[in-house]
Amino acid sequence: MKRKVYLSLLSMGLACMAVTLLISTWFFWRSTQHQIQQELTMTMDVVETALEEGHDTSLYLKKIGIHHTNGLRITWINARGDVLFESDYDKGIMENHLARPEVRAAIENGEGTAVRDSQTLSKALYYYAKKLPDGTILRISLERDTFYAHFLSLLPWALLLLGLSALACVKASRLLTASLLSPLRQTALFIRQINDSDVKMVQPPRVDHELQPLVDKVFLQSQTIADNMRSLEQQRNIMRLIMENLQEGVILTDKSYGIAGLNLRAARFLGAGNTQAVLQRNLQELLPDAPWDRLQHMDSVCETKLMRADRLYLLTLQPVYKNDDFYGMLFIIDDVTEQEHREQLRREFTSNVSHELKTPLTSISGFAEVLSTGLFKNKDDVIHFGTLIRKEALRLLQMIEEIMHLARIEDGKRQVNLERLCLRDLVQDIVEFMEPVLTEKKVTVQCTMDDTEVLADRGLFRELIMNLLDNAVKYNRPGGHVYITVRHDDHKAFFSICDTGIGIPEDKQQRVFERFYRADSSRSRKIKGTGLGLAIVKHIVEQHHGTIALSSKENEGTTITITLPM
């Protein structure tokens, strides 16, 4: 734009200068013509006055022609056109002048003028003829330079003037261009600053009054746009935070199932590290196990389950519409592995509880039926059946109590009273308490313990060690050993109990901490128990922010290690 304005101003200046020069030349030439005509008139008046007062006309005219050397020529013609006097030529050889236009005009109108070029292009002859009172014609002529001769003589000066004027035009055009574009530059700078987030404007800048309405309007529009952009950016960030923190994967496709948008969890489900890696790709290629055949005729929400990498996913499909036109499909991917696992545990728990409760209840029912129908033989039978009923009822109550105790621990309803606890003292106390059982089972306990102290609930930890030691003795072999180790480092305390018992099959080890689960072996099934001990141990460890690990080999023994923060 600057170049265009500059060239326009320069062209306008040069054009005006050229037109001015031509008009000035024309006026100068007109002025010269008028001056020559006045000169001819004045000379005619002088000569005519002298002729009217003089006696010898020819002698007077001859004297005037001799003394005037500035191109003045005098011709005296009679009414028939014959030359009576000629100052520059011999009148005897002069032709009749009656046909000359200035002479004919003087005869008819009293005076006449004419301009004729001389034999050279650089001169022109100006004629002025006047009819005298005696009927003769007096003609005066002046020889002057032609217009072209004047122009050529002035051409060097004109060119010099044009050159200087052109330089002046160039300078003036630059100054005018800068002056004209300065407000526009200010306006453009202001508009650029609008898009600069580092520049904050509270009011528009002051520019020329012609551009001020535009600047004010742009400023108001920029503020509106900035407010809208901030609002959209905030909404976009909120939506991105929501999408990225969803536990479900979300995928939006177009009509041809090309991925139009997705969150990070969905990208990882499809095997990509980020969302950009799978955008615009066809979802049918990345998720071939989806029910694509059902999508052709689906007009409502559809759910299906997918198995991928040992994880179970619930895939929810829903059509998406934009302005009542079908846009694409929305895929929601929810990892339901843990939910399905909990549901499986619930079913197994129900089955195990039913099974465990059925045995003592069946016994109690059978013994009660014997007593109620009088099938006993004597008083000793009544005492015997009563004792059995009491024993089974106690077993049933113990099982219910353990279930309720485990439920309280899992729900956090059992208050944990933390205190500084020395594990060595607690283990020695429990070993001494279980000495009769150890003697009966012929199991030897060996302890290797330092003075490790942990922050724990004494009652819960006593129950934990009792359960572990009871299992180590119960599932041991006669003459077996139990090794208890307590140690610590700068950050953690370690408690481990190792037995030389029957061990746990490798395929059962992952489930031994489940409620009512017991390894399915012939010997373990013969040993009485509820299957809740290790489940209780696991939850006590979790309440104390610790970890539990199990290592076992069948027919060799089992080692359980508990790690606690100091």
Image (cartoon, helix red, strand yellow):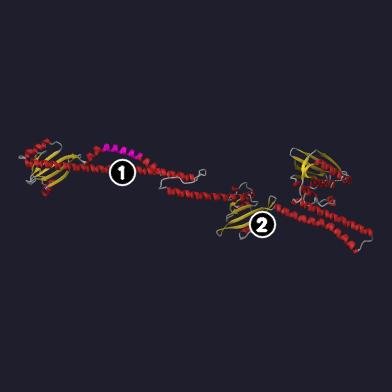
The residue positioned 57% from the left and 49% from the top of the image is 234
Question: Disc 1 versus disc 2: distance between alpha carbons?
Answer: 86 Å
- In primary-sequence order, the first of circles 1 and 2 is 1
Residue 430, given in percent of the width and then of the height, sits at 84, 44
State the extent of the magenta-drawn residues as a range. Answer: 155-171
Left or right: residue 230 versus residue 495 is left
| 528 in relation to 494, above or below | below
Residue hosting label 1: 16
At label 2, the amino acid type is: Thr
Give 241 or 75, whichever is nearer the viewer: 241
Residue 530, given in percent of the width and then of the height, sits at 82, 52
At label 1, the amino acid type is: Cys
Residue hosting label 2: 304
Q: Residues within 10 Å of mark 2 (few under 14, many from 20)?
A: few
The residue positioned 86% from the left and 60% from the top of the image is 365
Left or right: residue 514 versus residue 21 is right
